[in-house]
Image (cartoon, rainbow, N blue to C red):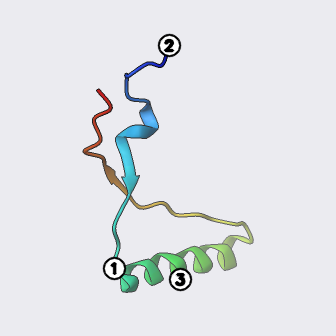
Amino acid sequence: MESKEPLDYDRYTAADLSPELLQRVVSLEEEIKQSTDKDVVLIAYEESQHNPT
């Protein structure tokens, strides 16, 4: 039987960013990668209005 309880990751959705803001996030990821020589992924999210019940 499937549970209707929300999972922790159901509480968040990807943030709706403008193309300009998205480019700034990508640029910052690249800047951090160049400084640290490590891959970095920044995640923009917002609390979801999703209600599975």
Whole-number angstrom distance, CA of label 3 to CA of label 2: 45 Å
Pointer 1 local density, CA inside 10 Å: few below 14, some 14–19, many at least 20:
few
Residue 9 quadrant: top left
Q: Residue at 50% x, 13% y: name it.
A: 1
Counting from the top left corner in percent of width and height, residue 18 is at: 34, 79
Give 41 or 48, whichever is nearer the viewer. 48
- In this view, the residue in front, 19 or 25, is 19
> Which of the two labelled residues, at mark 3 and mark 1, occupies the earlier sequence position?
1
Determine the residue positioned at 43% across, 18% down. 3
Residue type indicated by callout 3: Ser
Mark 2 and mark 1 lie on one chain; the one further toward the N terminus is: 2
* Residue drawn at point x = 43 percent, y = 33 percent: 8
What is the secondary structure assignment of the residue under circle 1?
A: loop
> Tag 2's secondary structure?
loop
Calculate the distance from the C-alpha at mark 3 to the C-alpha at mark 1: 14 Å
Location of residue 41 with respect to 5 vertically, above or below = below
The image position of residue 4, as x and y in percent, is 38, 22
Name which residue type carries label 2: Met
At label 1, the amino acid type is: Ser
Q: Position of residue 12 (x, y in %)?
A: 37, 46
Of the residues under marks 3 and 2, which one precedes in the sequence?
A: 2
In the image, farthest residue toward the right: 37
- Mark 2: few/some/many CA within 10 Å (<14, 14-19, 20+): few
Between disc 3 and disc 1, the foreground one is 1
Quadrant of the rendered image containing residue 40: bottom right
Residue with the mark numbered 1 = 18
**Tag nearer the camera, 3 or 2:** 2
Residue labelled with disc 3: 27
Dot 3 surroundings within 10 Å: few (below 14), some, or many (20 or more)? few
Q: Name the residue carrying label 2.
A: 1
Quick check: marks 3 and 2 in contact, CB under 8 Å?
Answer: no
> SS class of the residue under badge 3?
helix
